[in-house]
Image (cartoon, rainbow, N blue to C red):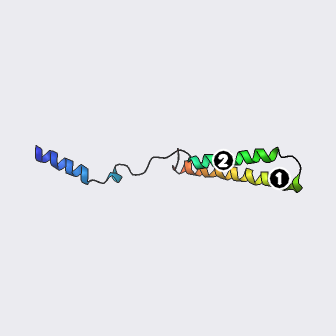
Amino acid sequence: MRIVTLALLLLMIAAPTTTVFSSAPPQDVPAEVDAARRALQGARNDLEHAGGKWGGHRVAAMKHIDEAIQELNQAEKFAREHHDIK
């Protein structure tokens, strides 16, 4: 009986844990990505309320920010589809 118990214990220790847990569980969106999204939204809001036309550059900057936010949304969607995040 002790030999069987010892053999099972040795087998459990020797067995790689990667076979039991084939991949890490998906994580939430990283805090850095959330912070970046909030920063972009804040910058866009600031530019929106800055007034003046600035030769069209303010509006162009706001469009670039919108594109960056959309890029983050697409990245998050990709990560969710590929089980990188919840």
Label number found at residue 37: 2
Q: Position of residue 73 (x, y in %)?
A: 65, 48
Mark 1 crowdedness (10 Å alpha carbons): few <14, some 14-19, many ≥20:
some
Q: Residue at x 72, y 45 (%)?
A: 42
> Does residue 23 appear anywhere in the picture?
yes
Camera-side residue of 69 and 46: 46
> Does residue 73 appear anywhere in the picture?
no
Q: In this view, does 20 lie to the left or right of 41?
A: left
Quarter of the image with the N terminus is top left
Residue at label 1? 58
Q: Where is residue 3 in the image (x, y as percent from the top left)?
A: 11, 48
Q: Residue at x 61, y 52 (%)?
A: 75
Task: Tell me the element at label 2.
Answer: helix
Q: Rounded to the nearest whole Å, what is the CA distance between mark 1 and mark 2?
A: 19 Å
- Looking at marks 1 and 2 on the same chain, the residue that comes earlier in the sequence is marked by 2
Q: Which residue is drawn at 78% across and 51% down?
A: 62
Camera-side residue of 51 and 3: 51
Q: In this view, does 38 lie to the left or right of 7?
A: right
Label number found at residue 19: none
Q: Position of residue 85 (x, y in %)?
A: 53, 47
Task: Tell me the element at label 1.
Answer: helix
Q: In this view, does 36 lie to the left or right of 7?
A: right
Residue type pointed to by label 2 = Arg
Q: In this view, does 6 lie above or below 55?
A: above
Q: Residue at x 11, y 44 (%)?
A: 2
Camera-side residue of 20 and 59: 59
